[in-house]
Amino acid sequence: MDDEEQRRKIRDFSFDKCKRGNQGFQRILLQLFGYVGHGKSSFINSIICAWFKTNFKNYANAAGTDESHTTQRLTYGLTNNIVLVDNRGCASMSAYESGEIFAQLGNLLPLDQGVGWSKGFGLADRIVEAEPLVKASDFIIPIFVYSIKNSPTPDLKDELKTIFQMSKKLTTVIPIVVLTNKNHQNSNEIKNMFTDIGAEKIFALENYTERNPKRKVETDSAVIRFLYEIIRDAEFRAEHPRDPDVEMMDRKWFVLEFIHARELMTQTQNLQREIDEQKAKMEQEAKRREEEEKKIMRRIRDQYQEKEQALQQQFERERLWDQYEHEQRMKELEKRTPKKK
């Protein structure tokens, strides 16, 4: 199937045309997520340029550096039924940032509004406040964007494996992987890493950027093929009975339970930290007291030894004096005693 036929399939896609009808779904949300500076916004620019056949323009305000300018869940419509969502990236997949990522992926936070990281149960409050603003009718496809320039490590692999497993539980879909900077030397190593952690669909391309604005047939074809595969996957999943309201509720409970477990773990860790700190203080105090007692004992011993030495010296002086007096008396006695003839 050539590009134009794929474009037609993408353009004509509608849940109304699926075998079971729309089942309550209206549009697909392509939920882009990942680390800061890995090219999510640039990928959106590439999709818009390729889909609408336009010259390059920085539609998504891509930073062009390792920094991120995206602090909102920004949407970009391709058709009436397909919408790109540029979610806020994270520096690391810590417990707090993962919670924010899951809330965005689950479509539990408003679109086209700011996204701020919340401590404690603040995220749960924001999810509840957003209930009137989010739509259960949005069909979610998670898209994980990763730059091949970033070399994999064992810790990164473990972190991504956990995120992919959690994302699948949340959305029922294994995240589709988009690799940017496809010609970098890390290409095969990165692809193998994502295959090892369970990724089933991996796409690689060079984004259009301000430094690389010229459109290429290869890049356009990669973008169109990516969108076409997304449509096919959505049509396949829509063949099964689904209830968008139930799925939305399941996602909400998943994230709320994650927040609860996270806070319980955090409180447990904080309590353990307090216990460890108190224990360390007690051990330090006990050590201080032990050292103080040792100092006292050394001081008492030194004083005793000084007194003992002083007594020995006094005894020796008295002994010598007694000996001297005895010798003097003996001499006097000898003088007074007549010598025998």
Image (cartoon, helix red, strand yellow):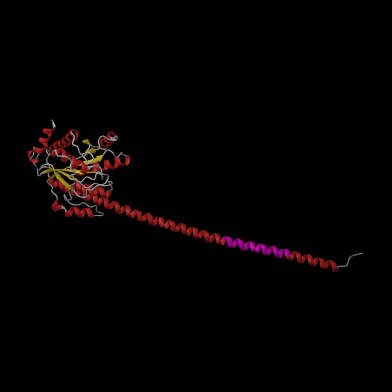
Q: In percent of the image, x 23 and y 55: which residue is there?
A: 122
Left or right, 126 with respect to 24, comes to right
26 vs 332, nearest the viewer: 26
198 vs 153, nearest the viewer: 153
Judge whether 168 appears above or below 71 on screen.
Answer: above
Left or right, 100 with respect to 24, comes to right
Q: Residue 232: image x %, image y %? A: 14, 36
> Considering the image in quadrants, where does the N terminus appear?
top left
The rendered magenta stretch, by its main secondary structure, is classed as helix
> Considering the image in quadrants, where does the C terminus appear?
bottom right
Q: Residue 199: image x %, image y %? A: 23, 37
The answer to whether any part of residue 237 appears in the image is no
Q: Identify the image quadrant of residue 305.
A: bottom right
Q: Residue 233: image x %, image y %? A: 15, 37
Image label count = 0
Q: Residue 271: image x %, image y %? A: 33, 55
Left or right, 251 with respect to 91, comes to left
Q: Residue furthest bottom?
A: 336
**In magenta segment, residue 221:** no
Q: In percent of the image, x 72 and y 64: which residue is there?
A: 319
User: Start and end of the magenta stretch?
Assistant: 301-320
Q: Residue furthest top?
A: 1
Left or right, 167 with respect to 4, comes to right
